[in-house]
Image (spheres, grey):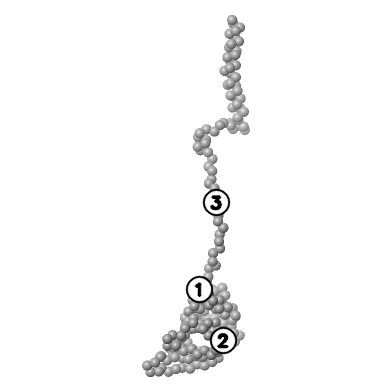
């Protein structure tokens, strides 16, 4: 009887002690480099590592229109306002007295047109009529002088003048180059073609004027 009880206690001890040892072994097997490999808890799942949201790749940039320098815009306005654009030399200057009850006194200036851009033909003799007050204020021409002019369209009285006064009149030197005075340089010196040059080759200047006139 005593032998039977001893064997029964041994079996019971195996039933209860073996699972504990196996559980301990499992815990040991789940330790790697000192870090227990435990199943994730609810807290770990809730506060898991932050995942950054996917961001779409940036759209390719489309080059915009090339900005136009303010100097070119101002020059283009002068071209737009002109009804007659040409270069040539002065052939005659005469003064018309004031007719009673008629149009005001005027100064008549004739040109031999060498290059025509707008409102005139090459080789033509053009005679313009300016208000006599412009001559008195210093707006004068001399025979033989070569100029590049931007003129307003003639008024109802047939009078005209350079656009924006002296700004619409350019002198040419003996080699046919455009001469820029202080006013021209101050206003249009930043233009990419004019580039603050006191003397500009005629072809460069004519191309600029012709190109701007074609944009209208």
Name the residue at 59% across, 87% down.
Answer: 174
The residue tagged 1 is 73
Residue 1 appears at what percent x and percent y? 59, 5
Q: In this view of the protein, can residue 188 be seen by the observer?
A: no
Q: Residue furthest top?
A: 1
Q: In this view of the protein, can residue 57 be seen by the observer?
A: yes
**Tag 3 secondary structure:** loop
Residue 132 appears at what percent x and percent y? 44, 90
The residue tagged 3 is 56
The residue tagged 2 is 122
Is residue 121 shown above or below 39?
A: below
Name the residue at 58% across, 17% down.
Answer: 15
**Where, by quadrant of the figure, is residue 35 drawn?**
top right
**Tag 1 secondary structure:** helix
Rate crowding at label 2 as few (under 14), some (14 to 19) or many (20 or more) other CA atoms within 10 Å: some
Q: Nearer the viewer, residue 186 or 148?
A: 148
Residue 45 appears at what percent x and percent y? 52, 36
């Amino acid at each position: 009887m005593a032998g039977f009880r001893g064997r029964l206690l041994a079996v019971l001890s195996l039933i209860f002690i073996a699972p504990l040892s196996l559980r301990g072994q499992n815990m040991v097997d789940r330790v790697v480099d000192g870090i227990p490999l435990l199943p994730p808890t609810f807290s770990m799942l809730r506060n898991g590592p932050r995942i950054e949201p996917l961001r779409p790749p940036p759209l390719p940039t489309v080059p915009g229109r090339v900005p136009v320098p303010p100097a070119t815009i101002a020059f283009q306005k002068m071209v737009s306002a002109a009804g007659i654009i040409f270069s040539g030399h002065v052939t005659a200057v005469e003064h018309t007295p004031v007719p009673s009850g008629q149009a005001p006194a005027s100064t008549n200036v004739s040109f031999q047109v060498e290059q025509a851009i707008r409102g005139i033909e090459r080789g033509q003799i053009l005679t313009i009529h300016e208000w006599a007050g412009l001559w008195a204020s210093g707006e004068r021409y001399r025979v033989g002088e070569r100029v590049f002019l931007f003129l307003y369209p003639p008024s109802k009285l047939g009078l005209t003048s350079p656009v924006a006064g002296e700004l619409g009149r350019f002198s040419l030197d003996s080699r046919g180059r455009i001469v820029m005075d202080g006013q021209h340089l101050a206003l249009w010196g930043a233009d990419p073609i004019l580039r603050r040059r006191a003397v500009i080759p005629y072809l460069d200047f004519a191309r600029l004027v012709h190109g701007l006139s074609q944009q209208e």
